[in-house]
Image: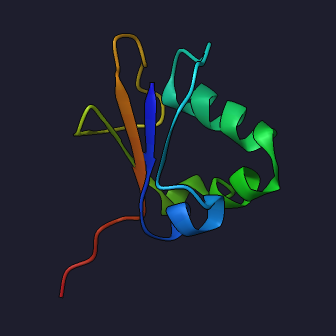
Amino acid sequence: MDILYFAWVRERIGLPREQIQTSASTVAELVEELRAREERYAMAFADLSALRVALDQDLAEFDSPLEGVREVAFFPPMTGG
């Protein structure tokens, strides 16, 4: 599965994207796996209310299933001006 990080999420983790193997069945479980990796992931995913997620380029919720998903993207909420 491809994981993409945008904006300050990318800055905290230090990677724009990575490919991982996961046993997670939902986005929330994936986040827990990532948090457990090391401190930079824990910092990036400390406040899920400040994050949005897209599965295969469609906005999703953190309780969404990952079955069949090829790409997960994490990014801060969009703001307009």
Q: Quadrant of residue 29?
A: top right
Residue lying at 70% horizontally and 51% vertically, measured from the top left: 41
Q: Where residue 66 appears, x then y in whole percent?
A: 43, 19
Q: Quadrant of residue 12?
A: bottom right
- In the picture, measured across the screen, residue 79 lies left or right of residue 22, that is left
Residue at image x 36%, y 65%?
77
Q: Is residue 54 left or right of residue 26?
A: left
Q: Is residue 8 above or below residue 42?
A: below
**Coordinates of residue 38 in the picture (x, y in percent):** 81, 47
State left or right for residue 72 relative to residue 78.
Answer: right
**Image quadrant containing the C terminus:** bottom left
Q: Quadrant of the N terminus?
A: top left
Q: How many marks on residues?
A: 0
**Please, which residue is most extreme toward the left here?**
81
The image shows residue 67, relative to residue 59, as above or below, that is above
> Measured from the top left, where is residue 24 in percent x and y?
59, 18
Q: Which residue occupies 41% across, 60% down?
A: 6
Residue furthest to the bottom in view is: 81
Residue in the picture at 40% in, 36% down? 72
| x and y, in percent, of residue 57 in the image | 23, 39
Position above or below: 28 against 11? above
- Colour theme: rainbow
